[in-house]
Image (spheres, rainbow, N blue to C red):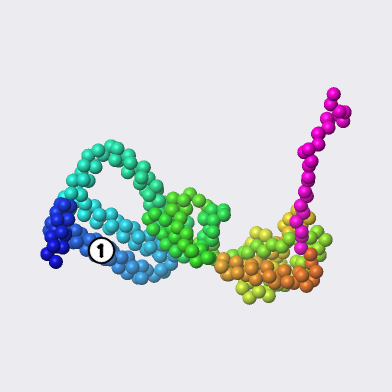
Amino acid sequence: MEAETRKIVEVLQALGMDLLVLLKVVAILFAAWFVERLVYFALRRAYKRSPTQGPEQRTSYRFFRNGVRTMMVILALIAIIYVIPSLRSLALTLFAGAGILAVVIGFAAQKALSDIISGVFIVAFKPFRVGDMIQAGEIGVFGTVEDINLRHTTILTFEHRRLMIPNSILSEDRIVNSSIRDERTCEFIEFELALHADVNMAMAVMQHQALLHPDRIQGPDVTNMENPNESITVRVVKIHEGAITLRMYVWAKDPVTARRMHYDLNQAVLETFLENHIPFSLPIRRAVQADHTRPIPPADGKAAQ
């Protein structure tokens, strides 16, 4: 036991530490933890007392909670470096050449600083909030915003996977927010039929199946593409390459319900089309085969001299 204690003392002395310095380090860690817990409970109490507790309040609460935790870790690390003599002398030596070090640190922290500032802007201007369903970019995946911290935003996808996207990327990308104002969603459901198909019968089948679905809701009074005199609007949106594209506009209470309803109606309409012998379009492919082993005749049709 005495040998082990002696080794610990030797290691501490090699680091320039004694028992007093060790107690100071422990005190710094405890103080950082205590302050972080104190601020956390204060923020949580303020959030619980908020009259609305909506997405805006939840987003600000999550962001400031994560920010306080990060700041306390940084301050505790700086205080520990200052207390330990060997680390303090090393830090002073490094900062003696502040010119090159400042450039290196500036380049290294440029991306992190951009993410922090972008996170502040996201919380301030609220293009999305914790709990909103968003899509980042044109081909980005849909998901629910789970958390926003100083560096990145966590999105929970439909596959129950968490996607971490830096705040600077989200602030520059195009965001599709399905929850910020009204969660009601107009789902586009399309089918491609053959040119000789009975379009009126196909439209009637699609409207009938949509009206039977339990998740369908009545859409807003003023819409862009729908016929206000019809419960379900179906339009011919494209005729291209031997196919007629029919689009049906169906409303649901939220994006998740709309996506699930879309899949259900795909199956229901498909089965009904097959029962009524309504033909789907077949892709047209033209294959051109060229024989490169034969000489190409001249343009005037005469053999080359």
Give how far across and how far down residue 299 sits, in percent.
83, 30
Q: Is residue 179 magenta?
A: no
Q: Residue at x 15, y 59 (%)?
A: 7
Left or right: 110, with 18 as reference point: right
Q: Residue at x 77, y 54 (%)?
A: 284
Q: Which residues are magenta?
A: 280-305
Q: In this rendered view, identify the residue nearer to me: 267 or 221.
A: 267
Secondary-structure class at tag 1: helix
Q: Which residue is mark 1?
A: 33
Q: In this rendered view, identify the residue nearer to me: 64 or 224.
A: 64
Dominant SS of magenta comes to loop
Graded by Cα atoms within 10 Å as few (under 14), some (14 to 19) or many (20 or more), the crowding at tag 1 reads some
Q: Is residue 297 magenta?
A: yes
Instruction: Write down the quadrant of residue 190 in the picture.
Output: bottom right
The amino acid on which the numbered mark 1 sits, given as a three-letter code, is Trp
Placement of the C terminus among the 4 image quadrants: top right
Q: Residue at x 79, y 41 (%)?
A: 291
Q: Residue at x 76, y 52 (%)?
A: 285
Give how far across and how far down residue 183 sits, in percent.
54, 66
Left or right: 298, with 26 as reference point: right
Placement of the N terminus among the 4 image quadrants: bottom left
Q: In this rendered view, identify the residue nearer to me: 300 or 5.
A: 5
